[in-house]
Image (spheres, rainbow, N blue to C red):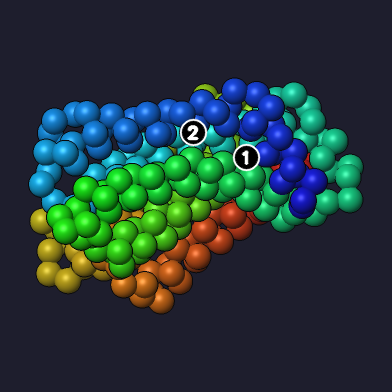
């Protein structure tokens, strides 16, 4: 697994991929948080990082599938998947190596946003007037969210040898699992209790819940279960199609 992890990290940062991902993420966030007047913190008159944690999932919705689309698609397209299977590695080791590699890249992208927190801390009146618990919970929620999107995108990548197709499937699945259940719950047919159940199936409900600063074990279990579910689907497909 660790050999796959090192290979993935080297693949990200020995080319422009890793730098482009980090640069795009920080540039879009920076423009929205500090430049665009409708969202700028400077015009918000309130010490908060709400803009960051509202916009980041939308960026991840496209950025993470773009990062992960090559994980298995490129291996299948170039014929190196067979080489991986000849090594003393199990399917789970291959999957986890690729998963942790992508998660590390996302962590590197999120880490510089600590500067935004420090800036808001300094600009607060009085200084430090910011809800630290809410920010801490939001960062944990964002990291869990990235973990689910990566698991979904890996599953999309293993389904097709075409990277563009893998990206489109990954982005669609991420959208459906994040917002899809909420939109379905707003249909008149689901009013009267069923709507709340449907909302709890989606990521958005648990992401907003954990972003309030209270780490509920139900939210943590949901995130971990969703990650395992999509990694299991990836493993199942990889094992069933190993000799194809």
Numbered circle sitting on residue 137:
none
Query: Which residue occupies 57% across, 31% down?
Result: 18
How far apart in space, not on screen, are marks 2 and 1 (Cα)?
24 Å
Whether residue 108 sits left or right of residue 207 in the image: it is right
Query: Which residue occupies 63% across, 50% down?
Result: 100
Q: Is residue 168 above or below residue 121?
A: above
Q: Secondary structure at mark 2?
A: helix
Q: Nearer the viewer, residue 37 or 9?
A: 37
Q: Earlier in the sequence, mark 2 or mark 1?
A: 2
Residue 154 in sight here: no
Neighbor class of circle 1 (other Cα within 10 Å; few <14, some 14-19, many 20+) is many
Expressed as whole percent of the image width and height from the top left, the position of residue 226 reads 48, 60
Closer mark to the observer between disc 2 and disc 1: 2
Disc 1: which residue? 158
Disc 2: which residue? 22
Whether residue 120 sits left or right of residue 176 in the image: it is left
Q: Secondary structure at mark 1?
A: helix
Expressed as whole percent of the image width and height from the top left, the position of residue 244 reads 76, 37
Q: Nearer the viewer, residue 144 or 105?
A: 105
């Amino acid at each position: 697994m660790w050999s796959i992890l090192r290979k993935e990290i080297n693949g990200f940062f020995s080319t422009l991929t890793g730098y482009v991902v980090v640069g795009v993420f920080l540039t879009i966030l920076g423009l929205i948080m500090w430049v665009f007047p409708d969202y700028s913190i400077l015009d918000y008159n309130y010490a908060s990082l709400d803009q960051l944690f509202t916009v980041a999932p939308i960026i991840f919705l496209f950025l993470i599938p773009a990062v992960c689309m090559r994980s298995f698609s490129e291996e299948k397209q170039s014929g190196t998947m067979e080489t991986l299977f000849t090594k003393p590695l199990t399917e789970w080791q291959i999957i986890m190596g690729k998963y942790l590699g992508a998660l590390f890249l996302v962590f590197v992208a999120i880490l510089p946003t600590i500067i935004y927190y420090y800036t808001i801390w300094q600009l607060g009146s009085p200084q430090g007037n910011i809800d630290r618990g809410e920010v801490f919970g939001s960062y944990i929620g964002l990291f869990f969210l990235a973990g689910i999107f990566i698991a979904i995108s890996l599953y999309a990548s293993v389904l097709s040898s075409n990277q563009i197709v893998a990206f489109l499937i990954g982005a669609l699945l991420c959208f459906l699992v994040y917002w899809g259940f909420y939109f379905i719950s707003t249909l008149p047919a689901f009013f009267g209790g069923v709507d709340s159940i449907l909302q709890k199936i989606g990521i958005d409900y648990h992401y907003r819940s954990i972003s309030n600063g209270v780490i509920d074990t139900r939210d943590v279990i949901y995130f971990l279960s969703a990650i395992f579910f999509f990694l299991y689907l990836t493993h199942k497909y990889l094992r069933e199609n190993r000799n194809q």
